[in-house]
Amino acid sequence: MIIVLKPNVTQDEIDHIVGKIKSLNLQPHVSKGQYRTIITVIGDEDIIREQPLEAISGVESVKPILKPYKLASKETHPDRTIIRVGDIEIGGDKIVLVAGPCAVEGEREIIEHAKMVKQAGASMLRAGAYKPRSSPYTFQGYGALGLKYLAKAKEETGLPIVTEVMDPRDVELVAQYADVLQVGTRNMQNFNLLKELGKINKPILLKRGMSATINEFLMSAEYILSQGNKQVILCPRGIRTFEDITRNTLDVGAVPVLKDFSHLPVVCDPSHAMGLKDYVTSAALAYVAAGADGIMVEAHPNPEEAMSDGQQTINFEQLVELKKKLASVALALGRGIY
Ligand code: PEP
Ligand code: MN
């Protein structure tokens, strides 16, 4: 940690700051330059992070050296994390394609959708039983019943299931059915939910909050990791900007940054990023070109009939085409695809 002092700092103020740091059992080193004095602090940064040092007279700014997300950071974990879901290794050499409807629409329906997903060549099924809708008057999902339908779809196709959990009270139940538990954009900073998810032994797909910075995103991953669950997949899914043609703005730049700052795998959602079916494929290819370890898309045999998010949902033919194009981009990058 480096403490930058104000140009007019007095010796009394410097002595006070040095005394304060020593009282925390940390070592201060004062360096006086021609114009400025800085204090380098050696020791556990977490101790000093808790201190409101900028409140002390004579302090201009405090610059931490280490990332506050210790467990999510590459600084403390240089090897990339690979998360296993059945035979699939997320974060390894091959990229993964996850596809399915926005919501579980019924038992017969999700089985049909799962078969379509499998036939198109995707390796995992996504669908929400619990739906975080913007309006309380729209379809809210089948809830616990939807989880049972997902289990049937898995039984029929063998596809692992990715499904959202919205409430800390549902974590145990959802974990019985899901191979990967999804945290939606609106819950990225639901810290009680994140802490509960940190106590289970299942992979978590953590979506980026629609207005969250990359640091906030990684701090949310840290919440899960800090409770013991080391299986976190980061999911960029577009962010809010002034742009209003697309539902969100494609945060493709987040991918190389996340892969540089963190060892966690990155699986991106171009459907919610773009919000319009015609742009989903291009966005998916861009995410993979930028280094994503996988893509999760909304797909439905008849998007016109989808119970939610039909406007951004691709059909069977488009899903087949997407898989083909993803395979080419993966190949160009020296990677394969499941
Ligand atoms: C979803 O995946 O269906 C969903 C609701 O996503 P998000 O939380 O990213 O909006
Ligand atoms: Mn959706």
Image: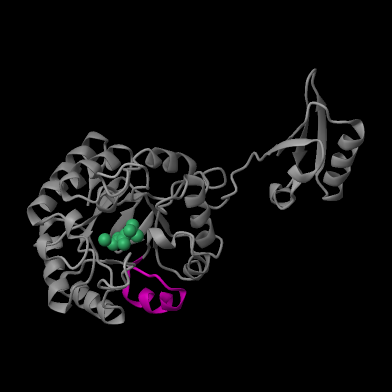
Answer whether residue 92 is magenta in the image.
no
Front-most of 7 and 184?
7
Which residue is located at x 42 percent, y 54 percent?
Answer: 209
Does residue 36 sit above or below 177 in this rendering?
above
Is 261 placed left or right of 55 in the picture? left
Front-most of 316 and 330?
316
Is 167 placed left or right of 34 in the picture? left
Does residue 71 sit above or below 124 in this rendering?
above
Query: Where ligand 1 lies, by image quadrant?
Result: bottom left
Please provide percent x and percent y for residue 246: 26, 45
Q: Image quarter for residue 330?
A: top left
Which residue is located at x 24 percent, y 77 percent?
Answer: 151
Please provide percent x and percent y for residue 106: 17, 77
Is 97 placed left or right of 30 in the picture? left
Is 97 placed left or right of 50 in the picture? left
Q: How many callouts does the rendering have?
A: 0
Please provide percent x and percent y for residue 165: 38, 70
Residue stretch in magenta: 164-181
Front-most of 12 and 65?
12
| Quadrant where the N terminus is found in the figure | top right
Please provide percent x and percent y for residue 258: 43, 43
Q: Image quarter for residue 306?
A: bottom left
Residue pushed farthest top?
Answer: 34
Answer whether residue 170 is magenta in the image.
yes
